[in-house]
Amino acid sequence: MEHIKENLERLKTEIAKICDKHKRPTSDITLVAVSKTFPPEAVVAAYACGHREFGENRPQSLRDRFLEIKEEGISWHLVGALQKNKFKYVVGKTALIHSIDSAETALGIDEFCRKRTLTQDILIEVNTSGEWNKMGVSPALLPELLEATRSCQHIRITGLMTMAPLTSNEKVLKKSFSTLRTLRDTYQKSYPELKHLSMGMSNDFQIALGEGATILRIGTAIFGARTEPKTFRV
């Protein structure tokens, strides 16, 4: 697991350089190590390097990690889809749910939390690329979703999330990320807690940082290549 330490050090050095270039403090950036499909030992190895923010794609996987890894101070992030019947696996165990894209799901989490005297931080996932196979609310419907949750008392919408297209075209990637930033800046006036931009993964985080990302979701660049077929990049 020595490669994990080396990868983390290399990654954090690169993040610091990019932040310096754009005159941003590194303290503004949360690096989420997406550990899906990797063994618990990989998470523990990253933890031993001082890392504390970890992400899982599936609710069941996050539940399992939460139960089997007992190191103190870990913050878990759900970066994949969440259905109503899976709320029990993550709500109350998760520092941040990145992937809410409907009022129905947001209101469902609010009600789930109300019954248990909990508060859950969430992000709204926005489909900034317009790709039909991507999850996320369309930019045009974002204000409607935000308004539908305005009266919720048991969820906090702390920002927006997007997944960029799977491409090496920097102009396309930049447009996807800048669209999310513009949406955040526009609606933050009415929703002051709308602070974070969760965008940028192993292949495109440099561009995302340049466009204002505050949360990076990175797996391969930390843990190495996955052996399973990829359904999306992290």
Image (tube, grey):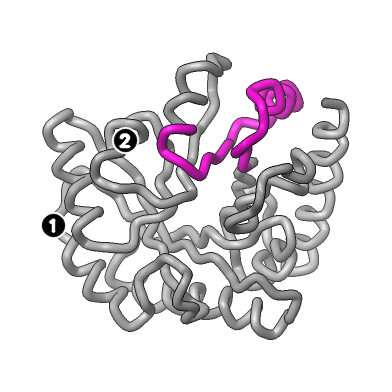
Q: Nearer the viewer, residue 58 or 193?
A: 58
Mark 1: which amino acid? Ser
**Could you tell me which secondary element the residue under label 2 belongs to?**
loop
Query: x, y percentage for residue 210?
Result: 69, 70
Residue 55 covered by magenta stretch: yes
Residue 113 rendering spot, x and y as whole percentages: 20, 37
Q: Residue at x 23, y 45 (%)?
A: 109
- Whether residues under marks 2 and 1 lie with C-beta atoms below 8 angstroms apart, the answer is no
Whether residue 210 sits left or right of residue 134 in the image: it is: right
The quarter of the displayed image where residue 6 is located: top right
Task: Check disc 1 and report the residue beneath it.
Answer: 151
Task: State the residue at coordinates (26%, 38%).
Answer: 119
Tell me the amino acid under the disc marked 2. Answer: Val
* Residue found 71% across the figure and 65% down from its top: 204
Q: Residue at x 64, y 23 (%)?
A: 40
Residue 147 found in image quarter: bottom left
Q: Which residue is mark 2?
A: 91
Range of magenta residues: 34-61
Instruction: Find numbered disc 1 in the image and state the secondary structure of the residue it sits on.
Output: loop
Tell me residue 142's x, y (percent): 31, 74
Label 2 Cα crowd, 10 Å radius (few <14 / some 14-19 / many 20+): many
Q: Quadrant of residue 183?
A: bottom left
Considering the image in quadrants, where does the N terminus appear? top right
